Amino acid sequence: MIKKSGFDIKAIEMDDKEIRRVKKKVLIGPEDGSHNIIMRKFTVSPDGFTPFHTHDFEHVVKIENGKGIVIDESGKKIPVVQGDVLFINNNEEHQFQNPFDEPFEFLCIILNQGKN
């Protein structure tokens, strides 16, 4: 068993033309001996967003703090708040946005395919 404090894990700042004002922490991953899954925590600051993207694997998301918007593959804007959970199928386009005044945080659990 591995026990860690998420507060002690260094955040990776992500900011370019496709992703803005996002921080990512790999909470549990290959470095911890996890061969099948990776748990990540994302913090999207106000006016931030992730890319509109797909994965070739399904994943689950749990909104931890704040509120945000998820854009689905049809362009529909879906409001999400703390406590909401999402299942995103493989190859389903999606984007997370934070048009609000407070940070928006969510956990994302994916298959370990050599990607963090």
Image (cartoon, rainbow, N blue to C red):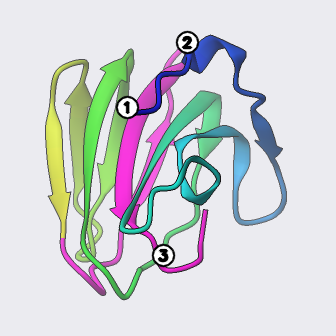
In this rendering, position of residue 70 left or right of residue 11: left
Of badges 3 and 2, the one in the foreground is 3
Pick the quarter of the image with the C terminus.
bottom right
Query: In this picture, is 30 found above or below 5?
Result: below
Q: Which residues are magenta?
A: 89-116
Pick the quarter of the image with the N terminus.
top left
As helix, strand or loop, the secondary structure at mark 3 comes to loop
Circle on res. 53? 3
Residue under circle 2? 101
Circle on res. 68? 1
The kind of residue tagged 3 is: His
The kind of residue tagged 1 is: Gly
Instruction: Please report whichever mark, 3 or 2, sits nearer to the chain's N-terminal start.
Output: 3
Q: Provide residue 103's location: percent of width, then percent of height.
A: 55, 17
Query: In this picture, is 56 found above or below 77?
Result: below
- For the residues marked 3 and 1, what is the alpha-carbon distance in whole angstroms? 17 Å
Quadrant for residue 107, please give it.
Answer: top left
Is disc 3 surrounded by few (<14), some (14 to 19) or many (20+) residues within 10 Å?
A: some
Q: Is label 3 in contact with label 1 (beta carbons under 8 Å)?
A: no
Q: Provide residue 102's location: percent of width, then percent of height.
A: 53, 11
Which residue: 32% across, 49% down? 70
- For the residues marked 2 and 1, what is the alpha-carbon distance in whole angstroms? 10 Å
- For the residues marked 3 and 2, what is the alpha-carbon distance in whole angstroms? 24 Å
As helix, strand or loop, the secondary structure at mark 1 comes to strand
Is disc 2 surrounded by few (<14), some (14 to 19) or many (20+) residues within 10 Å?
A: few
The kind of residue tagged 2 is: Asp
45 inside magenta stretch:
no
Q: Is label 2 in contact with label 1 (beta carbons under 8 Å)?
A: no
Which residue: 37% across, 31% down? 68
Is disc 1 surrounded by few (<14), some (14 to 19) or many (20+) residues within 10 Å?
A: many
Q: Is label 3 in contact with label 2 (beta carbons under 8 Å)?
A: no
